[in-house]
């Protein structure tokens, strides 16, 4: 039987959380990244449920805000979130559809930096997204003033379901088609960083220096 280590660094490693099975597996790490994104849609407590979305304004200024992840399709590499048609996000994506999303789970010590191309859903895809939106969420789109408009007092926000078609007139489901995912896994034994690139005809995965 081996003696327990007296090296402080070794002891710290022994107490660290177990390594992911995909620790040295590129394809496995990519699959795990998509699994975390899919869980972020279904689990409100998941840190991946509310990523940061970064865009560029028509004036060329950086903009970042939190969105709620509403859909994830690993096959088409699409993520989905919802916004208001009058939101600054819409003006940003119409001028520059390239965007980035940031996800981080402090307990799992996993960060994803996602580069994506944004597109508004229309037709049946829009109708499906709207039909699956809960009444409480629809109220957000029943406000008659545009998001970010000045108010004399907070109580001056006006909700009008009839004037906004129950909110449907201002509902904007957005798909973020994932172009790249940069994976970072912080582990006591040694960090792992990788790039999953989906821009070519075949996906290209490569390790990076953490």
Image: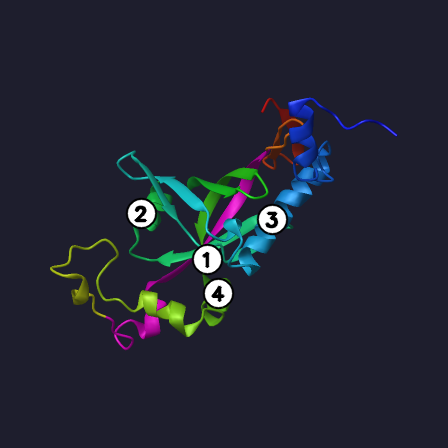
Q: Which residue is mark 2?
A: 91
Q: Nearer the viewer, mark 4 or mark 1?
A: 4
Q: Tell me which label, 1 or 3, sits earlier in the chain.
A: 3
Pick the residue in front: 95 or 134: 134
Q: Is residue 109 above or below residue 143?
A: above
Q: Which residue is mark 1?
A: 121
Residue shown at 51% from the left, 49% from the top = 47
For mark 1, does the 10 Å Cα neighbourhood hold few (<14), some (14 to 19), or many (20 or more) residues? some
| Horizontal arrangement in the rendering, residue 82 relative to residue 42 (left or right) | left
In the rendered image, the residue lying farthest to the bottom is 162
For mark 4, does the 10 Å Cα neighbourhood hold few (<14), some (14 to 19), or many (20 or more) residues? many
**C-alpha span from label 2 to label 4:** 21 Å
**C-alpha span from label 1 to label 3:** 24 Å
Q: Which residue is mark 4?
A: 129
| Horizontal arrangement in the rendering, residue 62 relative to residue 21 (left or right) | left
Q: Which residues are magenta?
A: 159-185
In terms of secondary structure, where does tag 1 sit? loop
Q: Tell me which label, 1 or 2, sits earlier in the chain.
A: 2
Q: Are marks 4 and 1 in contact (CB under 8 Å)?
A: yes
| Quadrant of the frame with the N terminus | top right
**C-alpha span from label 3 to label 4:** 21 Å
Q: Is residue 63 above or below residue 90?
A: above
Q: Nearer the viewer, mark 1 or mark 3?
A: 3
Residue 157: image quadrant is bottom left
For mark 2, does the 10 Å Cα neighbourhood hold few (<14), some (14 to 19), or many (20 or more) residues? some
């Amino acid at each position: 039987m081996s003696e327990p280590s007296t090296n402080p660094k070794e002891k710290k490693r022994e107490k660290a959380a177990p390594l992911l099975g995909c620790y040295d597996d590129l394809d496995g790490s990519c699959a795990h990244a998509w699994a975390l994104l899919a869980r972020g849609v279904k689990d409100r407590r998941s840190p991946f449920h509310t990523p940061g979305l970064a865009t560029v304004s028509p004036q060329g200024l950086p903009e970042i805000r939190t969105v709620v992840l509403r859909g994830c399709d690993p096959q088409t590499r699409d993520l989905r979130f919802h916004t208001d048609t009058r939101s600054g996000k819409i003006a940003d994506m119409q001028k520059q559809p390239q965007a980035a999303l940031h996800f981080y789970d402090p307990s799992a010590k996993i960060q994803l930096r996602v580069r994506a191309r944004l597109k508004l859903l229309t037709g049946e895809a829009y109708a499906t997204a709207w039909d699956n939106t809960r009444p409480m969420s629809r109220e957000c789109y029943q406000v008659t003033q545009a998001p970010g408009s000045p108010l004399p007092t907070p109580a001056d926000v006006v909700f009008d379901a009839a004037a906004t078609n129950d909110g449907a007139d201002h509902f904007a489901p957005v798909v973020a088609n994932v172009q790249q995912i940069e994976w970072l896994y912080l582990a006591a034994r040694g960090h792992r960083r990788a790039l999953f690139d989906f821009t070519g005809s075949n996906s290209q995965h490569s390790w990076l220096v953490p």
